[in-house]
Image (cartoon, rainbow, N blue to C red):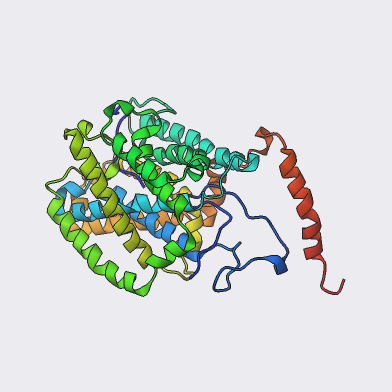
Amino acid sequence: MTNSPRPHGHHRSPLTSVERQTDGSPGPRPPRTPAAAVATAPGGKPTGQRDPFFDNAKYLAIVLVAMGHVWDPLKGQSRVLEALYMVVYAFHMPAFIIISGYFSRSFDMRPDRLKRLVTGVVVPYVLFETAYSLFSRWVGGSDLSISLLDPWYLTWFLAALFVWRLTTPLWKLIRRPLPLTLCLGLIASVSPEIGDDLDLQRVLQYLPFFVLGLSMKPEHFQLVRRREVRVLAAPVLAAALVVGYWAAPRMNIAWFYHRDSAQEMGAPWWAGVIMTLALYGCSLVLTACFFAWVPRRTYWFTALGAGTLYGYLLHGLVLKAFAYGGLFDEGWVRGPLGEFVVTVAAAALITALCTRPVRRMFRFAVEPKLAWAFKQDAAEAARERAKAPVRAADAQPANA
């Protein structure tokens, strides 16, 4: 979900709603209703249940994130690895952002949702931005300072998610938000003056994918899950790998990060418009191929999809520790067998970090409740009082 780090100053069957946002942060919860009144989606699945498709997609994407991070310091030694890296970076971040946008459709300025935005996005951002900065200084020996305005390494996604979700009511109000955000992304790609505050380059350049998710409906995901699309996805991905192999020594990989303008990468401004448009198109096609291959049923890894934010934020500390320790400079790592070993190890690591024990251990940092920090909202209290009789009635035995 990110790319190689840069120093400070460098300029997630029928689909249903879920109780948590797909990025891992707490999201708007559907109201509880008596079992007889629960609506069902086409196909008979209650709309309040988690759809395994999205949890599977999040887990598989986060595994690709971890693989990409261990490929980053090794890709210069292998053209094949660099081609894989380029293809993965073309779609894994857009896939996450589209899912995040899809499950942000119900976000508004209601107090309880604002509270969850703070506890599920803002607080983890502050904690992990601080943790990464201190870790880099104490373990890596850098002179990195703590700056909440200049996200470092993985934390940029939380900063971006905060901006995207906070502006969701605006995009829902505008008649044609997608073309507007597309224009904003293209303008950002040729505007070096934007600077580093909250990593606004990436916020703006990735914004169209978030708004695309906001605009999508369950039937749109059904389209890419049809059998003919799954069959077509195989040659498309194969062609992408061939193109990636050809482009690896010829193309600046920084285009895939969407963190800089064209001028900052030494290209003319018009190249920024062309390249960004081309990458948008490639990302959409490859994301559709990825979604087409995501399993629809529940598997052993499906439950891990609920913990992808934990894996995302925590695995960076482990990989940084290995990097500071010189693991990626070892000779055995830079051969085909070493690359395979660290790739499997990265997948195993991110899997372990998404499990329930790890989530319980680090919930204080990733999903803190912080009830003491907020006033009791009268409307929310009234909703809870209204739910109480329903819960009491549901708890009665059938012959009461």
In the picture provided, is 91 more to the left or to the right than 391?
A: left
Residue 293, placed above or below residue 4: below
Q: Is 148 positioned to the left or the right of 319 in the image?
A: right
Give the x, y percent position of residue 126: 49, 33
Q: Nearer the viewer, residue 74 or 210?
A: 210
Which quarter of the image is occupied by the C terminus? Answer: bottom right
Image point 82% across, 73% down: which residue?
Answer: 398
- Residue at left offset 56%, top offset 46%: 107
* Location of residue 227 in the rendering, given as x and y in whole percent from the top left corner: 36, 74
Residue sitting at x 67%, y 34%: 374
Which is more toward the observer, 279 or 274?
274
Query: Residue shown at 27%/58% (left/top)?
Result: 341
Label count reads 0
Measuring from the top left, give residue 330's x and y in whole percent.
21, 47
Left or right of 81, for residue 310: right
Q: Is residue 100 visible?
A: no
The residue furthest right is 400
94 horizontally vs 80: left or right: right
Q: Quadrant of residue 238?
A: bottom left
Relative to 297, is 54 above or below? above
Q: Quadrant of residue 114?
A: top right
